[in-house]
Amino acid sequence: MRLRIALHNEAFEPLDDLARWHAELQAQSHPRSAAESLFIGRVRGETADGSALAALELEHYPGMTERQLEQLAQDCGTRHGVRSCLIQHRIGRVLPGEAIVLVAIGADRRGPAQRCCQELLEALKHDAPFWKKEWHRDGSSSWITGNTPF
Amino acid sequence: MGEPPANGIRIRLFAGLREQAGWAEQHWPLNAASEPPLTPQQLWEALQLPGPLSSIRIAINQQFSRADAPLNPGDELAFLPPISGG
């Protein structure tokens, strides 16, 4: 499985990153996958309590986060027999509307591609050390202690 | 900051737990593997960290581990509050 994982501390454009990933795979004579499943997560404009959000701050555990993402991707990709996996994740201050995460899975069939994409996204939400802090418009902030509903 | 001294435990806190405790990193002296072994549970209590350890995940040398896992000199121990990625 071809795997790429990157953490961005500035805004990234998921579809541009995806195009670069495709070009890189093609340059390595990696045939285009017949099935590809994508997930893009963006910051909503409201906090957990419904008030306006100024920004999200994403903290991570340098070293462990990258290793854990790689382990989760290898395990999930092997389990589903997929051909390629791209994970891009933001760290630092992220504004409403900006992308937080991109997961792109290439496989021979739609079933493995979709299942792996969904499972890997849930795995990284629960088992990769990231933490989100909500910044409110009044300058106050609070840590989020769980994930949004599925 | 930096690499942990070989004769101790580097203890790290993150996110809300770091803010509650008021520190990000401490060094705990440990010259040799103790008997009975020192554990994350014992350090949590000795450092009087806030809240129940049951809500916290533990990593030793950047791998998820258990509260009763034995610690050795040179280990990096992290207490991780609830994760919210993606």
Image (tube, coloured by chain):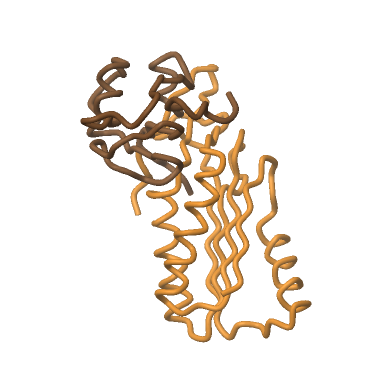
Image height of A62 relative to A135, above or below: below
Location of residue A131 in the rendering, given as x and y in whole percent from the top left corner: 46, 36
Q: On screen, B48 above or below A90?
A: above
* Residue occupying image coordinates x 32% and y 44%: B65
In front here: A53 or B79?
B79
Which quadrant: the N terminus of chain A?
A: bottom right
> Residue A91 occupies which quadrant of the picture?
top right
Q: Residue at x 53, y 80 (%)?
A: A107
Q: Residue at x 29, y 15 (%)?
A: B48
The C terminus of chain A is located in which quarter? Answer: bottom left
For this rendering, which residue is in front, B40 or A37?
B40
Residue at the right extreme of this rendering: A27
Q: Report the number of discs.
A: 0
Q: Name the spot of residue B43 as percent of width and height, x first.
A: 30, 23
- Which residue is found at the position 34% from the left and 37% from the top? B58
Measuring from the top left, give residue B15's x and y in whole percent.
Answer: 45, 28
Front-most of A52 and A70? A70
Chain A shade in the render = orange
Q: Which chain is brown?
A: B
- Image coordinates of residue A104 in percent, x first then y, are 57, 67
In-image side of A8 versus B4 (left or right): right
Instruction: Kindly indicate the quadrant of the structure image that contains residue B13.
Output: top left
